[in-house]
Structure formats: structure tokens, C-alpha cells
């Protein structure tokens, strides 16, 4: 086993242990919008780097996004295709399940609303599954993906999204813990049944609402 594999396995085992122990849970709850900092979170001005020990190097020349499953118009976009779509800029907060939050992140990319208009999911779609270039997956209810503030972001703070934070493209789902905002996005699959992702099958909550402390399932 390589050093990278050992580091990855240790990280996964640690986070699974956190889930079993309910680490960081405060027992508080707050309605979304009632407070800006969710229960159990601490504010930071840094952007900590968290991954599975692998940071895939995907150039914009190599990158592509496939959208498949229960859609009327499956797509496969290269970088030029992606940038030719209507661009959206937004500002939102990050809330990580490891208990840090970062306010006022400036993003640019294409909105989930626009993608849905392009691919036209079928009426029976209930869930979305993201696939990343490092093998990571995470799931969302269709309603969460269709929210007004969800983006497929290629830029952060006016610059191309750094590799360590998921560049060239990552998902941004501001209302949920940030493990739901998959880095290094390569594929989106629309489903009629749920398909829990990497952390969801390892003890983490299937939804991930920070204000009700949905850290673990």
C-alpha cells in the first residue's frame, strides 16, 4: 500500500469514527435565516483544504462534464461549451461539517437552474448524484439542486478556482454542509431513487443541513 493510500485510509477511518461518536454535535438547532453562523460552527477567514488525499490535476483542455440519467437531453460539455453558457455571479457562505464556516465567498459559474433548463429532467427525477475526478460521489435531493443559489463554479474571488479547492469546476450548494458541494466535477446523474454517496454510506447524514446539525446519519 502506498503512502497516499495509507493517508487516505487513515483520514476515512478518522471521519467514520467522528460519525460514530457524534463529534461536534451541540444539540442546538436554528431555523435557516434565524442566524448566520450555524450551531457548532466557528468562523474562519482562511479556506481550509479537505479532500481524500488525492487532488486530481485536470486541465481545462482535458476537462469535460457529462450529464446523464433521467433527462431528455443528455450532454457532454468541454471547457469551451461550459464557458459559452450564461454565466452567473453570486456570494455565499461555506459551512464545513468539520465545524468551520467562511463568510462572503464570491463565485462565478453556471447556475443549476440553467443546467436544468438545458437537460430537462424527466418528471420522475427525485435525486441527483455528483461524480468527481477523484472517484468521490455525493447525492442531493432534486429540490436542493434546483435551488436558486446552487452553482457549478469555475471561479472564486475573481480568479480560476484553485485545484486544491476543486478546480476546474466544483458544485456550490450553500445551504448544506460543504461535503455536498463536490469538487473536481465530471458527471451529474439524475435518478428516480436515492443513491447515497461516499460519506453518506460512511455514517454522514443523507441531507446535511447545517442549521439543524445534520452532520451524521
Image: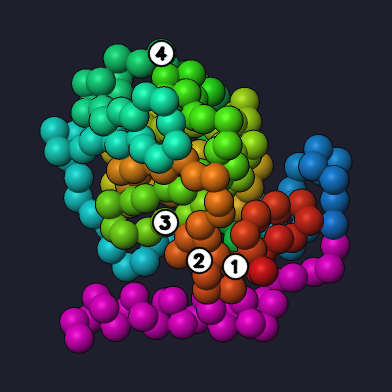
| Frontmost residue, 99 versus 154 | 154
User: Which tag, 1 or 4, sits closer to the chain's start?
Assistant: 4
Q: Is residue 124 above or below residue 139?
A: above
**Residue, disc 3:** 137
Query: How far is disc 2 from disc 3 in space, using C-alphas?
Result: 8 Å
Mark 1 is surrounded, within 10 Å at the Cα level, by few (under 14), some (14 to 19) or many (20 or more) other residues, namely many
Question: What span is in magenta?
Answer: 1-28
- Which part of the image, by quadrant, shows the C terminus? bottom right
Query: Which residue is located at x 35 percent, y 16 percent?
Result: 85
Mark 3 is surrounded, within 10 Å at the Cα level, by few (under 14), some (14 to 19) or many (20 or more) other residues, namely many
Q: In x, y percent, where is residue 173?
A: 56, 40
Query: How far is disc 3 from disc 4 in space, using C-alphas?
Result: 26 Å
User: Which tag, 3 or 4, sits closer to the chain's start?
Assistant: 4
Q: Which mark is residue 86?
A: 4
Query: Which residue is located at x 84 percent, y 68 percent?
Result: 27
Name the side, left or right, on which 57 lies relative to 209.
left
**Residue, disc 1:** 204
Q: Is residue 102 above or below residue 24?
A: above
Q: In x, y percent, where is residue 204?
A: 60, 67
Q: Which mark is residue 199?
A: 2
Q: In x, y percent, where is residue 67?
A: 35, 35
Which of labels 3 and 4 is toward the front? 3
Amino acid at each position: 500500500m502506498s503512502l497516499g493510500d495509507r493517508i487516505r485510509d487513515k483520514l476515512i477511518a478518522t471521519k467514520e469514527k467522528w460519525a460514530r461518536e457524534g463529534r461536534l454535535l451541540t444539540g442546538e438547532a436554528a431555523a435557516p435565516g434565524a442566524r448566520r453562523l450555524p450551531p457548532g460552527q466557528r468562523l474562519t477567514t482562511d479556506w481550509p483544504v479537505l479532500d481524500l488525499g488525492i487532488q486530481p490535476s485536470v486541465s481545462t483542455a482535458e476537462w469535460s462534464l457529462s450529464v446523464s440519467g433521467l433527462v431528455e437531453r443528455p450532454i457532454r460539455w468541454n471547457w469551451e461549451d461550459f464557458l459559452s453558457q450564461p454565466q452567473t455571479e453570486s456570494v455565499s457562505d461555506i459551512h464545513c461539517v468539520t465545524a468551520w464556516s467562511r463568510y462572503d465567498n464570491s463565485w462565478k459559474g453556471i447556475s443549476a437552474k440553467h443546467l436544468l433548463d438545458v437537460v430537462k429532467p424527466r418528471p420522475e427525477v427525485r435525486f441527483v448524484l455528483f461524480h468527481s475526478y477523484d472517484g468521490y460521489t455525493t447525492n442531493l435531493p432534486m429540490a436542493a439542486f434546483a435551488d436558486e443559489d446552487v452553482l457549478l463554479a469555475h471561479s472564486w474571488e475573481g480568479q480560476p478556482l484553485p485545484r486544491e479547492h476543486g478546480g476546474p469546476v466544483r458544485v456550490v450548494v450553500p445551504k448544506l454542509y460543504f461535503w455536498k458541494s463536490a469538487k473536481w466535477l465530471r458527471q451529474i446523474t439524475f435518478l428516480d431513487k436515492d443513491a447515497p454517496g461516499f460519506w453518506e454510506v460512511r455514517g454522514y447524514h443523507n441531507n446535511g443541513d447545517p442549521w439543524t446539525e445534520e452532520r451524521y446519519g
